[in-house]
Image: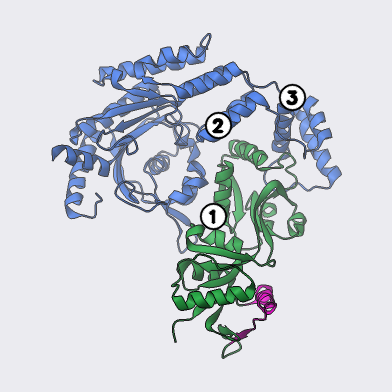
Amino acid sequence: MGAAAPANFEALEAQARTLLAVFIAAGHEAVAPPIIQPAGVFLDVLGEALRGRTYVFTDLNGEELCLRPDLTVPTCRLHLERTGGKNGQAHYCYNGPAFRFQPQGADAAHPREFRQAGIEAFGVADREDAEAGVLAIVLTALRQAGLRRWELKFGDLGLFDAVLDAADMPERWRRRLRHKLWRPEAFRAELKRLTTNPARSASALPAGLLEALDSAKPERAESLVAEHLDAAGIELIGLRSLEEIAEGLTAIAADAKAAPLSPASAAMIDGYLAITTAAPAVPDAVRALCATPSAGIEAALGAFTRRNTLLQDSGIDIDEVAFSGEFGRNVGYYTGFVFEVVAPALGPQSPVAGGGRYDSLLKAVGAAEDVPAVGGAIHTERLLAVVRGVRS
Amino acid sequence: MSAPLIFAVPSKGRLMEQTADFLGSAGLKLRKVGHERGYRGEIEGMAGVEVAFVSASEIVAALNRGRAHLGVTGEDLVRENIANVEERVVFLKPLGFGRADVVVAVPKSWIDVDDVAGLEAAAAAFRRVHGRPMRVATKYLNLTRRFFTAQGLVDYRIVESLGATEGTPAAGTADLIVDITTTGATLAANGLKVLSDGVMLRSQANLVGSQVAAWTPETIKTRDELLNRLGIAAPAL
């Protein structure tokens, strides 16, 4: 299946030319970001856990580098180097190898080296238009390359955020839940904890200080912490400031007295994540979860419906799209719409393409602020395998 | 004569002395062969054993590759350096010396952080404020990653540190550390405290058997004889 066999090499090259031609015709400039990337950026953005899946090495200058595990982050970096992070639209496409260590051993279904072809659209203000546009281009490219049958899967982390915002709870709890969304078990445990006993263990913490902080004005909090450290003879070391430590303590003090999350709110959040239905049925399913949908939920549903209409207009049968409330939670950097294209021959474990919105990624790699960004990538070896299977 | 059983023993320091004492207490005398500064030895009266004096971390590699049948080394080094421990080696006996705990330690001034859950909350806030994850200085890359993953901690970056790890938070090159400690005195002197549930591993020197070494009928016989002298039940290798 890999590019090493001459027949595959030729076929993959030809397929790549087909895919890139579609991308370029749609207004995406072809770029070739470096294969060797600074490891720090990837590990900062995607997390230390990814180090276990990435080929990280140190060069003779002692610099920590990696073989890129995907092409989205390298394309973001290339964009920033070119533009200095200034606002403005940019449309890129690429085709090239990416590398992943396979802990269970590499095989055809889990190659350590594969070729990704994809597109990224940065800075487009019309969000639904950009999302529908990227998906339509990816599907056109797949069709052009010979893919005849596929199934589409949608998720929407923006909708999840709206549901979370509508649930009545302190903002710090929302942040914690959002933070744990990527790990279903931890998320479930946290939700349960908030509905039963939100107080965190504070037995080892200075009780008097907690008590004082609870009633203190925020500007007093810092000096209370400073006084406590002085009295205990503890030196402040490291980068975390008094302000950050005071904030941590204040949150613990507040949690100790907070009323638990209401079962209704927890049920709404659980209910959203459990939704599996056809895309057009999503608004009704979401509204059924809440007594009166918040303005935020209505806005997110409006965007969802508009995107569906735009996709329908571009020839996609939206009735056939499977939506899952949970889908998208397993990749750390998506922030909104997410999609996957599954070929029946390969099944849902090996999607031939996928993508979505990731508005915070450019900032994470160095832009001054969040930049609207949507992208999609095709797993070219899988695509070739399916297309050949269909022909034979 | 057939190929001997290779027994890898620490080549220097306290660990070597204590290993010799341990063997000596069972009446087994460890002796270097040839040059005093050489790296080969034998156990008196056990012709089938060839002793290799190597460094503790090299012993782990030898057991993992099957170059040694048995070895004495720290559990921390074994668990750090072998990914699928259960398939490669067998811990035959904890030896009661070379004790060290592998712990997560943070600045004492982080009075809002007492356990891993508290660290997780602080790590998420840290990332929001500083735009980067907390840095963890350690030489135990794999143990740290495994422990944090199991605990659900994701917002951190490992900075490899091969010495004076406990000084890195004060120096500003890391925010917290994972390191070995025996009494905690060095940590305390550097303004650090161990998290209440931050002991990742209570390590000590172990007699370890390789599962991937060439176990011939002769080496098995030698092994069982040796283990018998040491009062250890023979394992299924």
The reply to whether residue A25 is in sight is no
Of residues A127 and A149, the one drawn nearer to the viewer in this rendering? A149
Q: Secondary structure at mark 2?
A: helix
Task: From the top left corner, tell me how far across and down residue B29 is, in percent.
Answer: 65, 83
Disc assigned to residue A187: 2
Task: From the top left corner, tell me how far across and down residue A6 is, in percent.
Answer: 18, 54
Chain of the residue on which disc 2 is drawn? A
Q: Which amino acid does the dot numbered 3 rest on?
A: Lys
Task: From the top left corner, tell me how far across and down residue A122 is, in percent.
Answer: 38, 32
Residue B159, quarter of picture:
bottom right
Q: Indicate left or right for A320 with A126 as reference.
A: left
10 Å crowding of disc 2: few (<14), some (14-19), many (20+): some
Q: Residue at 24% of width from left, 51% of height from top?
A: A3
Q: Which amino acid does the dot numbered 2 rest on?
A: Phe
Above or below, B81 against A353 in this view is below
Which chain is assigned blue?
Answer: A
Task: From the top left corner, tell me how far across and down residue A257 is, in percent.
Answer: 74, 24
Is B21 part of what is drawn in magenta? yes
Residue A130, quarter of picture:
top left
Q: Which amino acid does the dot numbered 1 rest on?
A: Asn
- Chain B painted colour: green
Label 1 vs label 2: CA separation? 25 Å
Q: On the rendered image, what quadrant is the C terminus of chain A found in?
A: top left
Disc assigned to residue A257: 3
Same subunit, labels 1 and 2: the answer reads: no
Q: Which stretch is magenta?
A: B12-32
Q: Indicate left or right for A298 with A391 as reference.
A: right
Label 1 vs label 3: CA separation? 39 Å
Q: Which residue is mark 1?
A: B142
The reply to whether residue A292 is in sight is yes
List the single residue furthest toward the bottom: B34
